[in-house]
Amino acid sequence: MNKGAMLFLAVLAAVAGCSSSDSGAGGTAGAGGSGGAGGDARACATDIAVGEVQAFGDPTPTRTEGLVFDANGTLYVSAQDNDGPDQLLEISSDGSNESVAEAESLLGLESLPAGILAAGIRTGNLLLIDPADGSNVEVAMDLGEPNFVVNTPWGTTLVSDDRPDVGSILEVDADGNVTVWSDEVPTPNGMVFSLDGSTLYVAATFQEAGLWRIPVSGVTAGAAEKWVAYETSAPDGVAIDSEGNVYVALNTAGQIAKVDADGSSTTLADDLRGVGPASIAFGQGDFDPCSLYVTSLFTTQMYRIGAGVLGVQK
């Protein structure tokens, strides 16, 4: 077992049995201004309306795509650079940013206690990055063109490979072994588990574009179903709130869609044309827990969108 796999084993053992989508009402919110809510309980900030789109923070060095909050409420995004290595940026609640790590390819992000998992879409690997010193270890390889990353409730990691005619959701276990978890969603991208872990919601971007759902039995994927169609909108990142509503970033439409438990889709925000909304996540820590924070495929500006509902607390 290589060093990366050993570290991955230790990390996954620590989180096994804990869903990345567990919800909760406690925690301490921030002080406002940049999106914190203030007080001792999580509450929606009052400086943004439901559906309102605000530019958030300073411009980033290059366009951004992956986005994740860690358990401490620190925000990280991946910045893609065609002329050099990609950057892992740490974004403060005041909107300032700094590069804390770099690698040849960084795209989708997920958080673990030991660091940030990053999918290398050009390198076909999965890295575990320590933001404290910028170091990384390779925990899995031969993943095709890995895009989005999500931790499972049973202690493994799922990685989407959205290549046309491949359409695989791969599972990486604690030893770094890679297997196909599901191959029924064409061009899978963003993924999020339901609040109870019984369903995986998946955005299909290019072929059969829409929001798909996969029932989960224990650790096994059931038959995938195209739940909501977004035929020409290039669905990308997804998120879930504390009420179980699913949000989908629609690249080419410049919209954020909200899907309720019945599969009814409404438009939360449509002021993102020319932005290419990519990854989305509800604020944690000092960030507004009722706002979605958004990366941009086409600009160097990040955005914040009022949702009016508490997101899931990590």
Image (spheres, rainbow, N blue to C red):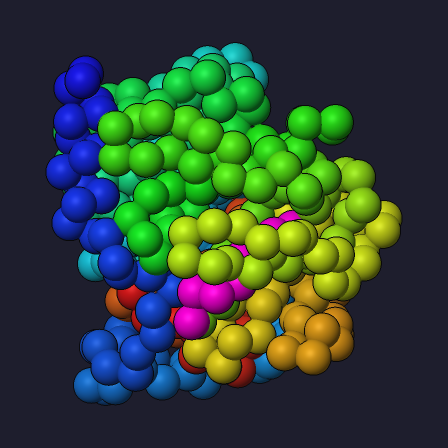
Question: Does 258 sit above or below residue 185?
Answer: below
Question: Does 125 sit above or below residue 214?
Answer: above
Residue 296 in the image: state x and y as whole percent.
59, 44
Residue 303 in the image: state x and y as whole percent.
54, 57
Q: Is residue 93 left or right of residue 218?
A: left
Q: Is residue 202 magenta?
A: yes
Total residue callouts: 0
Question: Does 126 sit above or below residue 14?
Answer: above
Per the picture, the main secondary structure of the magenta-coloured stretch is: strand
Q: Is residue 189 magenta?
A: no
Q: Residue at x 68, y 27 (%)?
A: 166
Q: Residue at x 25, y 86 (%)?
A: 41
Q: Which residues are magenta?
A: 196-203
Question: Does 35 sit above or below residue 41?
Answer: above
Q: Residue at x 21, y 23 (%)?
A: 4
Q: Nearer the viewer, residue 246 or 182?
A: 182
Q: Residue at x 69, y 79 (%)?
A: 262
Residue 56 in the image: state x and y as whole percent.
49, 57
Task: Report whether residue 36 is seen.
Answer: no
Q: Is residue 43 left or right of residue 107?
A: left
Q: Is residue 213 left or right of residue 65?
A: right
